């Protein structure tokens, strides 16, 4: 690690700034566990809920620059100014630095995902391919020769919140009760109804999540509606809803196109955009530390 990396070296200025952040832990702190991070996550409430102004909500970019580029272009063409990100900006994919820089420049806030956590703190419950990818990603953050860019990325990563409630909706990466790591699967409506009931108890009205990379809407009955069943649009009512926005960079619903949503004043629009999958797959193949499977799965969207 270069001597001025703010994570675990003597860069006093960077460490002081990181330490002052509500959500930042140094990696060698004994209680730097996901639970510790969750417990300390008291998010401020930025003004991101202006009624009538559409907001794009993206998630799970996973270092896929080709996917992120087409999504950002779509958002720009639609004239949408507000973008928020539900985490996993990095991990798995071949362009973590470029994706992180775009998110830093473009998003009003970014929630911490389990892969962001893995790079800043430590991998937690990762298989070997994910762990290898996490360590490779961390090495990319550490070895950028530009100190300013390097420190800016570490600061952003360290300041990601684990949950945010802006008065209109709750935003987390995984679930409201375990924001970083808990998955809410479509099958849970059959096999884990008690789990869903406890999760819905923690939601005031709308909750946006990512993490499973499978877009759709959970309602309290319980039930789950993929976007196609809704005609690509969920109309907001008084009922509670958990809305999974899908994944920009690694969709897993057998549709390889990038997924995100747009929150309008009265409905949520699901959007899919094709991108140059072959280029991303080739980049993954060219990096030894990234398992070829991580590229292959992009072709089928699994
Ligand atoms: Fe993810």
Image (tube, rainbow, N blue to C red):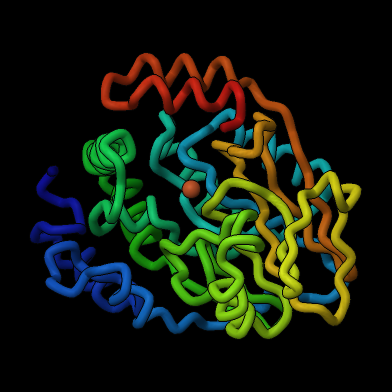
Q: Nearer the viewer, residue 113 or 14?
A: 113
The residue located at (53%, 47%) in the rendering is 60
**Which of the 4 quarters of the picture holds residue 86?**
bottom right
- Point out residue 298 in the picture as x, y percentages from the top left corner: 55, 26
The residue located at (15%, 51%) in the rendering is 4
The answer to whether residue 144 is seen in the rendering is no
The residue located at (20%, 58%) in the rendering is 6
For residue 173, above or below residue 231: below
The answer to whether residue 284 is seen in the rendering is yes
For residue 289, above or below residue 266: above
Total number of numbered labels?
0
For residue 273, above or below residue 200: above
- Point out residue 118 in the picture as x, y percentages from the top left corner: 30, 53
**Which of the 4 quarters of the picture holds residue 29?**
bottom left
- Point out residue 180 in the picture as x, y percentages from the top left corner: 43, 64
Quadrant of the rendering where the C terminus is positioned: top right
- Point out residue 58 in the picture as x, y percentages from the top left corner: 63, 52
Q: Is residue 63 left or right of residue 239?
A: left
The residue located at (79%, 62%) in the rendering is 263
**Which of the 4 quarters of the picture holds residue 228?**
top right
Q: Is residue 150 left or right of residue 253?
A: left
Q: Nearer the viewer, residue 154 or 190?
A: 190
Q: Is residue 77 left or right of residue 136?
A: right
For residue 220, above or below residue 126: below
Residue with the most extreme front position: 191
Q: Is residue 198 left or right of residue 40?
A: right
Quadrant of the rendering where the N terminus is positioned: top left
């Amino acid at each position: 690690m270069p001597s001025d990396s703010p994570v675990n070296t003597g860069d006093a200025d960077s460490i002081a700034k990181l330490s002052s952040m509500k959500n930042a832990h140094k990696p060698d702190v004994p209680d730097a566990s996901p639970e510790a991070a969750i417990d300390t996550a008291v998010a401020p409430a930025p003004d991101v809920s202006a009624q009538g102004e559409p907001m794009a909500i993206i998630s799970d970019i996973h270092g896929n620059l080709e996917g992120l580029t087409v999504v950002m272009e779509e958002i720009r063409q639609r004239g949408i100014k507000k973008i928020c990100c539900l985490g996993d900006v990095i991990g798995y994919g071949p362009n973590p630095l470029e994706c992180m820089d775009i998110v830093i420049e473009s998003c009003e806030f970014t929630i911490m995902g389990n892969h962001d956590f893995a790079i800043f703190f430590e991998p937690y419950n990762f298989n070997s391919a994910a762990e290898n990818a996490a360590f490779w990603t961390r090495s990319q953050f550490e070895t950028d020769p530009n100190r300013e860019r390097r420190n800016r990325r570490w600061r952003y990563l360290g300041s990601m919140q684990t949950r945010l409630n802006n008065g209109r909706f709750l935003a987390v990466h995984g679930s409201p009760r375990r924001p970083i790591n808990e998955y809410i699967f479509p099958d849970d409506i059959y096999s884990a109804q008690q789990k869903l009931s406890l999760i819905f108890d923690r939601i005031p009205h709308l909750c946006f999540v990512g993490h499973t990379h499978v877009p759709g809407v959970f309602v309290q009955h319980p039930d789950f509606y993929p976007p196609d069943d809704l005609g690509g649009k969920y109309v907001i009512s008084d009922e509670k809803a958990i809305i999974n926005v899908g994944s920009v960079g690694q969709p897993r619903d057998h549709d390889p196109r990038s997924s995100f949503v747009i929150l309008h004043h009265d409905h949520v629009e699901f959007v899919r955009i094709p991108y140059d999958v072959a280029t991303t797959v080739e980049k993954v193949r060219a990096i030894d530390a990234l398992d070829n499977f991580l590229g292959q799965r992009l072709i089928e969207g699994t």
